[in-house]
Image (tube, helix red, strand yellow):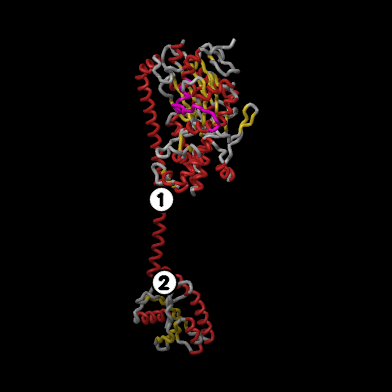
């Protein structure tokens, strides 16, 4: 059985932007988490390309983007901040097609193949109905293709911890819309999960305000432009006040002129280059007084969340949020958890340019300093392979969990099996 | 003398002064309906002639001439005519309007006497006008520009259609490239499948090697 599970382990990472999938390998296949609804027999183009399906997913989606003038209605991104709405039929159809796409691609011809052991990873705060839907999708695909021997679902932070080979840790996963702090000690400690309603979108918002201050109102409205500008010029300050002071004293050192690759479009930050630090700081400390003026002029303040009946401020500094999460765990566990804090997700990928290393830092150093300022010595590191780590964790899970460990809704673990559940 | 003979007489008079008879589409209606003759001078100036024959009653002729003067003034405000003459045939003195009217209006007076002598009694004033040739050129340019605009528009339409066709072709090429790439990947996967399988069995992947979770997860079991 171990040999079979090792051979036919299959992982799925349902990210908001990308679906990563595949059997055991160096890395997964990656396609965008989106699909396009095409009309049956309406267009000659579809006939020429031999399209008979209603929904297209995968790289072929881009081929159909020019085929309709009303594309926004038919191109669907099913997930927002890791969630699919319960009654969004179109979105669930896309999820079905994406899942099926993966199995069609990897279904082997081997004689001994009787279906994959599939581990799917969802957001730590995915509600129960998402679990039900994912199970339903897999059982349906199995009835059509005979490719799912068993399926299970794990939270993405657990998958990160598994890929990092760390049994006791805190995983901080930060994406576009939210940040989740999940303590893990052999299991995810679900009642200690803290979610903050902020992520890369807040850095985008500050970047847009900076563009407005620089006089680029039209550019500030272009989402993609704002994002690339943010990624190129944004910096995380070790200490924001100190960084701004130095940047104003030595404007040439911090000066940046952002040029859009392949064009002549330039954004010259001039003597406002110190604003680069605001882009990084807002992710870690949106409560700094410097952001008040931005909130006053209309920039959204991150909204609060509720954990176990307690209201968590949306602007809570990240270090404090981590401490709060650890405080929900058994007290004897806290020192072990602080020994390994893993930062995962695109929102933590920040460069530190040479020559600015006295003021600009990476995300791990920033969190470490925040915790140190609170009197907590912690070991903080970035996930080694942020793009693939969740998927790698799902593969390990598929291989390792025994075949007879059946699904338990209380623990939210175990195999949902052909012959037992569907 | 008949009217045509008068016309011929006047033609000769003006031709002897270097004018030529002028006929133009633009002035055709005027010639048909009002003026009797038109001439063009050496400097391209245009002269219009209106003949008035003596009436039985002098007062009637005088009134007629005055009406003609008013009509002429209305015409020349809208159309380019440099000089206008009224030619009165055998007029009595009392048949003519006051000389001041001619001078104020700038309309000239020529008389034809009983012995067919033609005398310019009051010279006509030269009116400022746009050069006929220039006007013609202006009109040509206008039509040329209009024609060019139409051609440019048609060219733009054609370019737009070519662009669309090109984009469609590029999309089809990209689609074919993706298909070819996919097929090649499948072939390469098949070839390297054996090696991959060996790797799978030997735990050659880094994320599997020495991973404590393999042990932790293998101990998962249903709680009793």
Can residue A33 be seen in this snapshot? yes
Disc with the residue nearer the chain's start (2 vs 1): 2
What kind of element bears circle 1? Answer: helix
Residue at 60%, 18% in the rendered image: A410
Mark 1 chain: B
- Closer to us: B149 or B65: B149
Question: In the rendered view of the protein, which quadrant contains the C terminus of chain A?
Answer: top right
Residue A104: image x %, image y %?
45, 22
- Closer to us: A3 or A209: A209
Residue under label 1: B154
How much space separates mark 2 and mark 1, taking CA atoms?
35 Å
Residue at 39%, 50% in the rendered image: B155
- Closer to us: B110 or A56: A56
Residue under label 2: B130
Is A388 magenta? The answer is yes
Mark 2 chain: B
Is A91 magenta? The answer is no
**In the image, are marks 2 and 1 on the same chain?**
yes
Compared with A278, A305 (above or below) is: above
Compared with A237, B117 (above or below) is: below
Label 1: few (<14), some (14–19) or many (≥20) C-alpha neighbours in 10 Å: few
**Which region is colored magenta?**
A373-394
Classify residue A411 by image quadrant: top right
């Amino acid at each position: 059985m171990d040999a079979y599970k090792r051979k036919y382990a299959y992982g799925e990472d349902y990210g908001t932007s990308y679906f990563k999938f595949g059997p055991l390998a160096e890395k997964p296949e990656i396609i965008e988490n989106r699909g396009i609804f095409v009309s049956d027999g309406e267009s000659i183009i579809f006939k020429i390309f031999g399209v008979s399906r209603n929904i297209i997913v995968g790289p072929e989606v881009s081929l159909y983007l020019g085929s309709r003038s009303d594309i926004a209605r038919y191109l669907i991104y099913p997930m927002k901040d890791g969630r699919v709405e319960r009654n969004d039929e179109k979105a669930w159809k896309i999820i079905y097609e994406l899942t099926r796409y993966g199995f069609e691609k990897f279904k082997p011809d081997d004689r001994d193949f009787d279906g994959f052991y599939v581990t799917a990873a969802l957001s730590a705060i995915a509600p129960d109905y998402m679990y039900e839907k994912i199970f339903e999708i897999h059982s349906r695909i199995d009835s059509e293709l005979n490719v799912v021997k068993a399926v299970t679902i794990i939270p993405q932070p657990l998958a990160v911890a598994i890929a990092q080979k760390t049994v006791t840790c805190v995983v901080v996963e930060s994406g576009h819309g939210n940040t989740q702090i999940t303590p893990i000690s052999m299991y995810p400690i679900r009642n200690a999960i803290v979610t903050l309603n902020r992520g890369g979108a807040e850095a985008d918002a500050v970047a847009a305000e900076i563009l407005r201050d620089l006089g680029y109102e039209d550019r500030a409205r272009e989402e993609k432009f704002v994002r690339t500008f943010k990624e190129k010029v944004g910096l995380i300050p070790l200490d924001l006040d100190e960084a701004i002071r130095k940047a104003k004293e030595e404007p040439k050192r911090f000066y940046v002129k952002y040029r859009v690759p392949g064009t002549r479009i330039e954004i010259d930050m001039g003597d406002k280059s110190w604003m680069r630090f605001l882009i990084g700081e807002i992710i870690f400390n949106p409560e700094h007084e410097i952001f008040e003026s931005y909130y006053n002029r209309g920039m959204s303040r991150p909204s609060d969340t509720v954990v176990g009946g307690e209201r968590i401020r949306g602007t809570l500094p990240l270090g404090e949020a981590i401490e709060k999460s650890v405080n929900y765990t058994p007290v004897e566990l806290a020192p072990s958890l602080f020994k390994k804090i893993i930062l995962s997700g695109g929102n933590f990928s920040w460069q530190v340019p040479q020559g600015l290393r006295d003021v600009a830092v990476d995300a791990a150093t920033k969190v470490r300093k925040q915790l140190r300022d609170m009197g907590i010595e912690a070991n903080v590191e970035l996930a080694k392979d942020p793009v693939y780590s969740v998927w790698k964790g799902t593969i390990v899970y598929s291989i390792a969990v025994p075949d007879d460990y059946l699904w338990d809704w209380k623990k939210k673990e175990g195999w949902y099996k052909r012959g037992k559940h569907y | 003398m008949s009217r045509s003979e008068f016309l011929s007489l006047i033609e000769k008079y003006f031709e002897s002064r270097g004018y030529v008879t002028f006929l133009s589409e633009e002035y055709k209606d005027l010639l048909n309906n009002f003026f009797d003759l038109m001439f063009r001078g050496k400097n391209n100036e245009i002269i219009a002639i209106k003949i008035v024959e003596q009436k039985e009653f002098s007062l009637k002729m005088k009134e007629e001439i005055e009406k003609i003067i008013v009509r002429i003034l209305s015409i020349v405000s809208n159309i380019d005519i440099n000089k206008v003459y009224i030619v009165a045939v055998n007029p009595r003195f009392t048949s003519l309007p006051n000389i001041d009217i001619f001078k104020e209006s700038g309309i000239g007076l020529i008389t034809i006497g009983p012995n067919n002598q033609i005398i310019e009694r009051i010279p006509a004033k030269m009116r400022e006008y746009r050069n006929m040739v220039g006007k013609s050129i202006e009109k040509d340019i206008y039509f040329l520009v209009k024609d060019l605009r139409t051609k440019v528009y048609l060219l733009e339409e054609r370019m737009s259609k070519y662009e669309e066709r090109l984009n469609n072709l590029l999309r089809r090429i990209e689609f074919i490239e993706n298909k070819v790439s996919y097929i090649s990947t499948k072939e390469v996967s098949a070839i390297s499948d054996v090696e991959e399988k060996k790797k799978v069995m030997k735990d050659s992947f880094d994320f599997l090697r020495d991973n404590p979770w393999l042990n932790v997860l293998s101990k998962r079991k249903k709680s009793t």
